[in-house]
């Protein structure tokens, strides 16, 4: 992927900053608004330095006022701007969900295509940092059920930078969900020195294999890769498919992999019911059942709120052990 | 404030167009010709007419479930009623291709950004449109029409706070017809003057007789001038009343006969007509002619709608993404 280009090593957090910075420099209609943007560059610091660089008109501190932020992003988008709105933790998206479900994503349809909404929503998702029930959610499944919304879930610095740049350039609303544990773990990775983007709607094969397809999302990609390395020692070859975009989902990439391996495990950091894994399972059952040699397995979190205590949270989160167990059941 | 004769006549025609539109829709809805449900604004015509007479075509409004009058007033009298009527009839030729219906009529070509049925969402959206005007340094103004029922939503407070904190060129115009569906606004709000809410946002709050188009025009003119100069938002209450129920089919038995009779007496159209005749801007004969012309225009619009095809079923799948 990065053969023959000059690369640099950056963190997942830096990838987010660079993507927004480059797009703001490139396009004067791009602006950013959110809580704690000015002093902190948002609570995890991904927008640090942008206020100093672009000023308070384009890097706007808001009140704790998610419905106004989301509504304003929609209004600004519909009138020619490219707003980026930071709705901090993804559970807060619920506060402004009808602004997302109705105003932002249905209005183009209801106007008969007289408007478009090029807005980017950026939020932290994911558990693993003892942030308890309201600050740890991956809202994949229920956001996939919103027609008109695109959703990107980057798992590496390379994907984060390329996908966020594409999200900002996209003429439709895009929800970017980046994992807070990948920020706090200071995940690093290579990105090209030169400018690049990654198309929305295209999955990435993070590891090629022939025995079992593991579709893993966000942080789970790393757990799947680590489990795959262990399984390789036992002679089991795992293909890790990272959808990167949940809507529109790259169904073909998943189906092609299943056709090759005949086995599917989906690793998804969400309570199992109505999660992204539910939809992916249904698609494969509907469109590629004949290629399956074993039942589809899902490695998800239990249908409970996310607990606080590290011991409980570890038990709640899908991990390598859970994946190994699931794979062993079908090979 | 002297208003040109032409503008006065334009405003009168706009009000007549809204009334005739609403009455014809009421009739056809009752006859089962219009799908879904409709919320009519008859009786409230002076509000959008007086406000929009101060706006340019590139200014923007947001509308509500009771929005036909907003679109007609913003568009101006040269804008055909036919695509609007066709939309209500669910036809392919509708202004929104039959995907909006009565409750979501909009047309950005004339500056009607959205009509929202979830109260308050259009106000925060309007704040965003006003933010665009500010960021781009245009002198466009955005007017968000709301009803009294929206006053107690969180979005009203969040949107007005944002508009005030950022000094946005936004006017929030509340058509206070007292009834939020079947609930009297004063039964659920501990306020006598709803414009007191403006104090909380540190912006001007002005109350006006929403059935007096010239009074509405004057108050709106000041607010529009303020917004254009970059002096920030204004909250306006137009005290008005609706002649029909909340939706067509609503018997509005929750209103006393006395109140309904009073509303009929406060009719803004005969009132303006009388005023224009007194001002010698209009004669009885000319007024009757306007009435007749608009009636013919509406009949033609309905004929156009009825003769238009329904959308192709394949249309379901288009327009989701840009």
Image: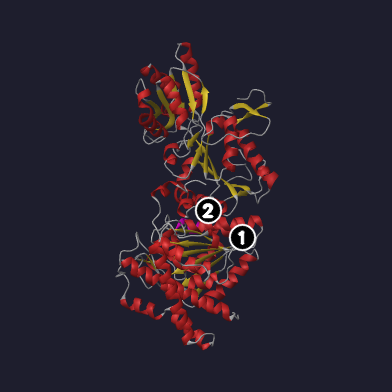
Residue A111 higher or lower than A305, as above or below: below
Classify mark 1: helix, strand or loop: loop
Q: Which mark is residue B167?
A: 1
Q: Residue at x 47, y 70 (%)?
A: B193
Main SS class of the magenta portion in the image: helix
Quick check: B13 above or below B143?
below
What SS does tag 2 mark? loop
- Report if residue A48 is visible in the image: no
Above or below: residue A3 compared with residue A286: above
Q: Is A174 a magenta residue?
A: no
In this rendered view, identify the residue nearer to me: B191 or A242.
A242
Judging depth in this view, the residue of B319 and B117 nearest the camera is B319
The circle on residue B127 is none
| CA distance for labels 1 and 2 | 25 Å
- Residue A117 appears in view: yes
Percent of width and height locating residue A275: 40, 35
Left or right side of A189 for B268:
left
Q: Position of residue A320 (x, y in %)?
A: 45, 21
| Residues drawn in magenta | B153-157
Q: How is the image coloured?
A: secondary structure
* Image mark for residue A115: 2
Q: Residues within 10 Å of mark 1 (few under 14, many from 20)?
A: some
């Amino acid at each position: 992927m990065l053969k023959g280009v000059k690369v640099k090593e950056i963190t997942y957090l830096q990838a987010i900053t660079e993507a927004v910075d480059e797009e703001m420099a490139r396009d004067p209609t791009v602006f950013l608004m959110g809580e704690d943007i000015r002093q902190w560059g948002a609570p995890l610091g991904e927008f640090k330095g942008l206020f100093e660089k672009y000023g308070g008109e384009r890097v706007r501190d808001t009140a704790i006022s998610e419905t106004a932020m989301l509504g304003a992003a929609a209004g600004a988008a519909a009138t020619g701007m490219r707003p980026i709105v930071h709705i901090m933790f993804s559970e807060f998206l619920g506060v402004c969900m009808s602004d997302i479900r109705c105003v932002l994503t249905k209005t183009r349809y209801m106007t008969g295509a007289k408007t478009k909404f090029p807005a980017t929503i950026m939020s932290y998702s994911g558990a693993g940092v003892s942030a308890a029930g309201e600050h740890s959610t991956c809202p994949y499944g229920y956001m996939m059920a919103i027609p008109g919304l695109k959703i990107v879930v980057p798992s590496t610095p390379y994907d984060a930078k390329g996908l966020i740049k594409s999200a900002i350039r996209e003429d439709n609303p895009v929800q970017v969900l980046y994992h807070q544990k990948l920020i706090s773990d200071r995940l690093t990775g290579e990105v090209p020195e030169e400018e690049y983007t990654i198309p929305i709607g295209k999955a990435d094969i993070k590891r090629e294999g022939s025995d079992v397809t593991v579709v893993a999302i966000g942080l789970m990609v790393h757990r799947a890769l680590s489990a795959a390395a262990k399984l390789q020692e036992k002679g089991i070859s795992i293909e890790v498919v990272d959808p990167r975009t949940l809507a529109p989902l790259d169904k073909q990439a998943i189906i092609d992999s299943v056709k090759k391996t005949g086995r599917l495990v989906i690793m998804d950091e969400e309570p199992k019911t109505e999660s992204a894994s539910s939809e992916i399972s249904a698609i494969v059952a509907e469109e590629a059942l004949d290629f399956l040699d074993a039942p589809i397995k899902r490695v998800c979190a239990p249908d409970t709120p996310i607990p606080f205590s590290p011991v409980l949270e570890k038990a709640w989160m899908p991990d390598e052990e859970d994946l190994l167990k699931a794979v062993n059941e079908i090979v | 404030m002297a208003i040109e004769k032409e503008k006065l006549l334009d405003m009168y025609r706009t009000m007549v167009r809204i009334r005739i539109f609403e009455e014809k829709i009421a009739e056809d809805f009752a006859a089962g010709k219009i799908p879904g449900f409709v919320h009519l604004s008859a009786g409230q015509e002076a509000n959008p007419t007086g406000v929009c007479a101060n706006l340019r075509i590139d200014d923007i409004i947001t509308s509500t479930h009771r929005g036909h009058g907003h679109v007609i007033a913003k568009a101006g009298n040269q804008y055909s009623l036919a695509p609007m009527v066709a939309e209500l009839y669910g036809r392919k030729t509708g202004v929104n291709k039959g995907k909006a219906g009565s409750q979501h009529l909009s047309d950005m070509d004339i500056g009607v950004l959205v009509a929202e049925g979830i109260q308050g969402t259009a106000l925060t959206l309007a704040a965003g449109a006003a933010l665009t005007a500010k960021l781009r340094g245009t002198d466009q103004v955005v007017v968000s029409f709301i009803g009294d029922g929206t006053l107690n939503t969180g979005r009203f407070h969040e949107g007005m706070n944002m508009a005030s904190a950022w000094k946005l060129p936004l006017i929030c115009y509340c058509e206070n017809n007292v009834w939020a569906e079947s609930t009297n606004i004063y039964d659920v709000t501990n306020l006598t003057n709803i414009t007191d809410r403006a104090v909380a946002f540190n912006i001007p709050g002005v109350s006006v007789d929403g059935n007096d188009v010239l009074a509405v025009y004057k108050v709106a003119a000041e607010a529009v001038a303020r917004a254009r100069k970059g002096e920030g938002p204004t909250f306006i209450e137009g005290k008005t009343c609706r002649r029909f129920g909340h939706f067509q089919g609503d018997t509005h038995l929750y209103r006393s006969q006395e109140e309904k009779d009073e509303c009929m007496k406060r009719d803004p159209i005969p009132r303006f007509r009388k005023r224009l005749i007194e001002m010698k801007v209009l004669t009885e004969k000319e007024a009757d002619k306007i009435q007749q012309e608009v009636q013919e225009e509406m009949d033609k619009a309905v004929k156009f709608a009825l003769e238009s095809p329904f959308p192709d079923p394949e249309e379901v799948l288009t327009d989701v993404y840009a």
